[in-house]
Image (spheres, grey):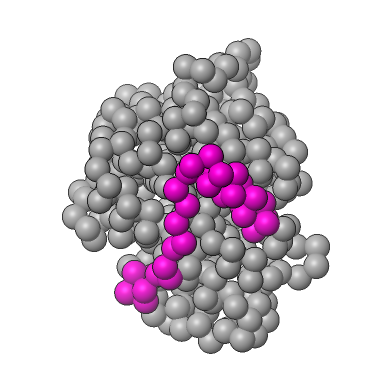
Amino acid sequence: MPLTVFTSDRWADHLTPPGHPERVERAEVMQVVASEFRRRGGAVVEPRAATEDELARIHDRDHIALIRETAGRAVALDPDTFTSPETYDVARLAAGAAVGAVDHVLDAGRGARALAMVRPPGHHAERNRAMGFCFFNNVAIAAAHARARGLARVAVVDYDVHHGNGTQRSFYQDPSVLFISSHQFPFYPGTGAADEIGSGKGAGFTANFPLEAGSTDVDYERIYAAAAAILRQFHPQLILISAGFDAHADDPLGGMRVTTPQFGRLTAVIAEEADECCDGRLVAVTEGGYDLAALAGSLRAVIDVLDGTTSLRALAVPTGAAPRADASLAAVRPHLSKFWQL
Ligand SMILES: [Zn+2]
């Protein structure tokens, strides 16, 4: 499977205050992983910045202007979300990497996959609000770009430990973009309850799988079997992954117990649906993941799946009881079963 990685050493130019988890060392991890991939013959592409029109498919012009006006300065936009002098440029480049990854996958033909390995992350950013370390919603901007290019159905699957509130709100009334999220609940940012399923024409096209803290590989395996079933029925023309690794057992923010190989499996389960429904068209966009070793290992696990070094069959299936997944599925079914067979 041909994989192209969109990444940049510019991620290191977005600085956060001392002790902040979304720290510059995350950029160094991404550079190391990208170099390894390049050394084994992988394609690594320097992205371009997203244009204002591309950002404006998701964000108000006022919000874009607000972030632009922080250029050259360090500003606290909320208690967790800080700019540094180059943040505006770096955040536009991260969004552009996600857009470029979509363009690549749509133009490169059957089976093309891409990974936008970026920081700052994006999935908490709302139309008019930077929050949760996020300025522009990279994955939502990528989904909107795919729609603007004429795709009728796009799916976004978010396995970051936090709920992707910004992505959900971007498409809450929109049946053309299916949003599926698994996340620790209750937890930051507070959204993502089982009864949040979309509204109006979008009813049923948001699927939240809230999970109690302590969820394991087996819990995630069960949840992603259900997510895969929804994907199969929706039959998207492109699948995007919000690939956050803060559900990892070693993560300092999340309270989950997911192991490094399971991030490969989750990605492989989603990739298999992409192979079935949309000629393999799959784009992963990184989100959180705050333990540096876990971040590095999980990125490698995802790259190994996306470039075909390993496959779903080759990755061990976790087994055992999954009480937290059972509870989540029991909470979700009453709300989603009229839209999807679960
Ligand atoms: Zn997160």
Residue 75 visible: no
Q: Position of residue 71 (x, y in %)?
A: 57, 84
Most foreground residue, 251 or 329: 251
Does residue 17 sit above or below 203 in this rendering? below
- The boundaries of the magenta stretch are 26-55
Q: Looking at the figure, which quarter contains the C terminus? A: top left
Residue 27 lies within the magenta run: yes
Q: Main secondary structure of the magenta part?
A: helix
Q: Which image quarter: residue 299?
A: top right
Residue 86 visible: yes
The residue located at (70%, 63%) in the rendering is 24
184 relative to 331 in the view: left or right? right
114 relative to 203 in the view: left or right? right
Q: Residue furthest top?
A: 320
Q: Position of residue 59 (x, y in %)?
A: 40, 71
Most foreground residue, 142 or 216: 142
Most foreground residue, 200 or 154: 154
Does residue 136 sit above or below 188 in this rendering? below
The residue located at (37%, 27%) in the rendering is 272
Most foreground residue, 115 or 23: 115
171 relative to 28 in the view: left or right? left
Q: Position of residue 318 (x, y in %)?
A: 60, 17
The residue located at (59%, 74%) in the rendering is 87
The residue located at (22%, 58%) in the rendering is 149
